[in-house]
């Protein structure tokens, strides 16, 4: 009984102790909750945002040009700083890096790096480089248009380097003299003959300077000139030809040589003076060759040619000024032009008094004495000396056909006629 009472008191004590612990726990919990409420009232709740997934890094070869420049910013700065500190170019730094990093593996890169380090530049050894002059020569030689040259540039870009179209155009514009329209807009011609010749001489000086040839200040320049007409070619009868008249008349000249005036040393000579590629036009007129047209050409160019023969012209190239004597030979003319210029309208040959109708007469062709040379070079010279007065006017007399073979009152050329030596050689006549 006594033990039971003890157990009962012990149980009550445990219950009381449990209730006390429970009250204490409830009090602490309420205090904690109130503290949290105070904290939550004083500070707002922070909600952490979800981080986006990390983008995978791309290779240098996979990024664009802008990203590549951004990635290489630090490296470029270091290269510039290193080059400035060592007084060399960035290309030389890169060249030495190629040389150093490939010394034992890639011999070709070692060679390229060595050249780049020593010179700071790397020429393309696999391409043929054409400058502007070479490109223009190719264009003229193959008769190419601007579009053809541009196509050739794109087609041969891996093998031949051709300058851009605008570079060729700007350079070629400097080679063209000033031109004007003539003959009621049926043709064009150079405005000033002296300017054209000076432009040719300056081009020759440029080529001599490229070859490191010492050029004296006193020079002699020689050229030949003449004019001729062309008709009947298919190109003039083409449907897409904008010219209504299927004829073309050209006044031309060809440079022959450039020499030292004092020593007569030849600085430049035209190796192919009869080539059409060396012919330079002075006038191009879409008209049939006629006496009136030849008279117009002679009245325009012969006074200028004579003035150039009598004086020297000054040609500037770079900082130097050269004094050049001009020699002009009037030899690029055929027999028809010579006949018209001579004023001998009654005869069609400069060596006899025959007409073209006589050349078709079978009886005269069979006659050995029908086409004898009746006008020698000496007689032609005397004839010219008696044609004009001191004032330049042509003398006119009645019945002068036998004396002057049909001389008209039209102005004649100031140049003498040339004897057709080729015809003499074919007829086995000795040269005069």
Image (tube, rainbow, N blue to C red):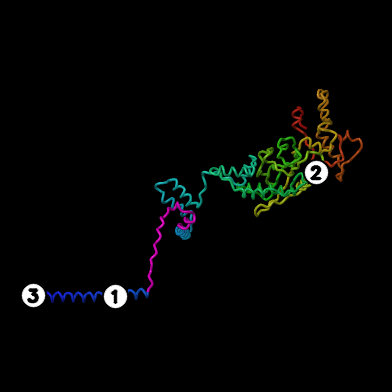
Q: On the image, numbered disc 1 is attached to which residue?
A: 30
Please give the range of residues in magenta: 43-72
Q: Quadrant of residue 353?
A: top right
Residue 366, percent across and down?
A: 81, 22
Residue 214, percent across and down?
A: 63, 48
Q: Is residue 134 visible?
A: no
Residue 170, percent across and down?
A: 64, 50
Q: Residue furthest right?
A: 398
Q: From the viewer's perspective, is 52 left or right of 247?
A: left
Q: Is residue 84 magenta?
A: no
Residue 3 is tagged as 3
Q: Residue furthest front?
A: 1
Q: On the image, numbered disc 2 is attached to which residue?
A: 296
In the depicted structure, whether residue 187 falls above or below residue 234: below
Residue beneath the point at 76% across and 39% down: 245
Q: Earlier in the sequence, mark 3 or mark 1?
A: 3
Q: Is residue 21 visible?
A: yes
């Amino acid at each position: 009984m006594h033990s039971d009472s003890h157990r009962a008191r012990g149980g009550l004590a445990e219950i009381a102790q449990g209730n006390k612990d429970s009250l204490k726990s409830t009090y602490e919990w309420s205090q904690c909750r109130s503290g949290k409420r105070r904290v939550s009232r004083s500070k707002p709740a922070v909600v952490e945002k979800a981080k986006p997934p990390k983008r995978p890094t791309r290779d240098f070869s996979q990024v664009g040009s802008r990203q590549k420049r951004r990635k290489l910013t630090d490296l470029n700065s270091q290269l510039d700083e290193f080059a400035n500190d060592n007084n060399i170019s960035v290309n030389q730094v890169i060249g030495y890096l190629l040389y150093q990093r490939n010394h034992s593996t890639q011999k070709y890169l070692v060679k390229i790096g060595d050249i780049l380090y020593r010179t700071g530049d790397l020429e393309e050894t696999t391409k043929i480089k054409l400058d502007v002059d070479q490109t223009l020569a190719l264009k003229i030689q193959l008769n190419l248009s601007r579009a053809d040259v541009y196509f050739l540039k794109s087609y041969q870009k891996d093998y031949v380097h051709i300058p851009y179209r605008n570079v060729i155009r700007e350079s070629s514009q400097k080679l063209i003299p000033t031109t004007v329209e003539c003959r009621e807009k049926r043709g064009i011609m150079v405005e000033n003959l002296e300017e054209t010749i000076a432009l040719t001489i300056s081009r020759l000086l440029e080529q001599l300077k490229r070859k490191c040839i010492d050029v004296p200040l006193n020079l002699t320049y020689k050229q030949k000139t003449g004019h001729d007409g062309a008709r009947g070619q298919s190109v003039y009868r083409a449907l897409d030809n904008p010219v209504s008249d299927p004829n073309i008349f050209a006044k031309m000249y060809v440079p022959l040589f450039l020499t030292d005036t004092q020593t007569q040393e030849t600085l430049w000579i035209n190796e192919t003076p009869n080539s059409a590629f060396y012919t330079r036009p002075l006038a191009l007129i879409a008209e049939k060759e006629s006496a009136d047209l030849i008279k117009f050409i002679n009245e325009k160019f012969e006074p200028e040619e004579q003035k150039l023969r009598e004086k020297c012209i000054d040609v500037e190239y770079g900082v130097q000024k050269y004094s050049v004597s001009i020699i002009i030979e009037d030899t690029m003319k055929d027999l028809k032009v010579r006949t018209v210029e001579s004023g001998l309208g009654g005869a069609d040959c400069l060596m006899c008094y025959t007409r073209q109708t006589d050349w078709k007469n079978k009886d005269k062709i069979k006659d050995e004495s029908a086409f004898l040379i009746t006008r020698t070079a000496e007689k032609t010279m005397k004839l010219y000396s008696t044609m004009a007065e001191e004032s330049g006017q042509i003398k006119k007399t009645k019945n002068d056909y036998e004396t002057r073979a049909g001389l008209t009152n039209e102005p004649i050329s100031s140049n003498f006629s040339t004897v057709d030596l080729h015809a003499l050689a074919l007829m086995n006549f000795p040269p005069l």
